[in-house]
Image (cartoon, grey):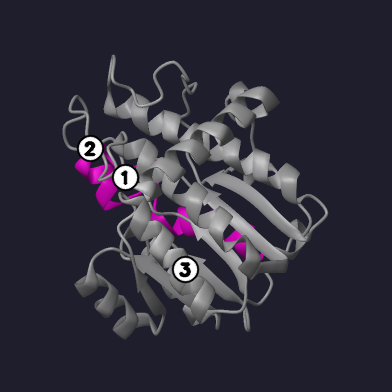
Amino acid sequence: MSSLGQPRERTVLVTGATDGLGRRLAAELTRRGARVIAHGRDPAKLRALRRETGAEVVRADFSELRQVDRLAAELLQRYDRLGVLVNNAGVGVGRDPTRREESADGYELRFAVNYLAPYHLTRRLLPLLKAPARIVNVAAAGQQEFGFLDPQLHRHYSGASAYMRSKLALVMHTFDLAEELRGSGVTVNALHPATFMDTTMVRESGRTPLSTLDEGVAATLRLILDEDLTEVTGRFFNGTHEADPHPQAHERRARERLRRLSDELVAEALSR
């Protein structure tokens, strides 16, 4: 039987920690004795989270890559090491899934927040992730092929497609980075925590929750703490079970193409 290790003396950064899964993760990890850095974009919610959990808090709006870059610089200055990075921040399909939205940088919003922001943050924070360390990317089971001819979904837009494409991009990044870091003592895995958890994101989409937050928290904590997963990397999990992602995630050329596109878009946003 696998066992969850104790997170004491382990510093864990959780993005999107002021609501839903991220908030519960931050609370549970601090309760277990971890040093938690909780990210959010709303100052009032961050203050409340700090009061309630004792977590250290940092602020950035992930819809603007300059803020993501500033956050990374702040973390690199304040901390010497991260034991775990949980990329959880994200946006769902939206209240009106027919309306295409853009980030502050002019990129399709779901692609920007769910993928480009964690992509850039992770790469900037690699110097802090010293072995043994873990990167956990909160993705989704619903994935759709990433189309390079229209990466910003200017044509045939739907919120569901944008969301599923962004989550597949995150899984592709997971596999790509795991290969890059293999043997370093830093593992990279992605998961679908649970289906339609009882969160604000799910309720805003008009869907009826099918899973509890407890289920999603348990699955995510497993990737953060399970001692049996110390050397497991480059995997996708559906809940607590390893699963097959969209086939594009296994295509090396597609992953390389996505990496080049991501670097170009980040550089463009930061140069403005």
Residue denoted by label 1: 91
- Mark 3 or 1: in front is 3
Which range is magenta?
Answer: 196-225
Report the residue at 37% width, 76% height from top: 57
Residue denoted by label 2: 94
The image shows residue 200, relative to residue 29, as above or below, that is above
Q: Is residue 223 magenta?
A: yes
Is 116 displayed left or right of 5 in the figure? left
Report the residue at 42% width, 30% height from top: 164
Name the residue type under label 2: Gly
The image shows residue 3, relative to residue 183, as above or below, that is below
Name the residue type under label 1: Val
* Tag shown at residue 73: 3
Report the residue at 43% width, 34% height from top: 166
CA distance separating discs 2 and 1 = 7 Å
Label located before the other in sequence (3 or 1): 3
> Residue 43, image x and y in percent?
23, 72
Name the residue type under label 3: Ala
Q: Are marks 2 and 1 in contact (CB under 8 Å)?
A: yes
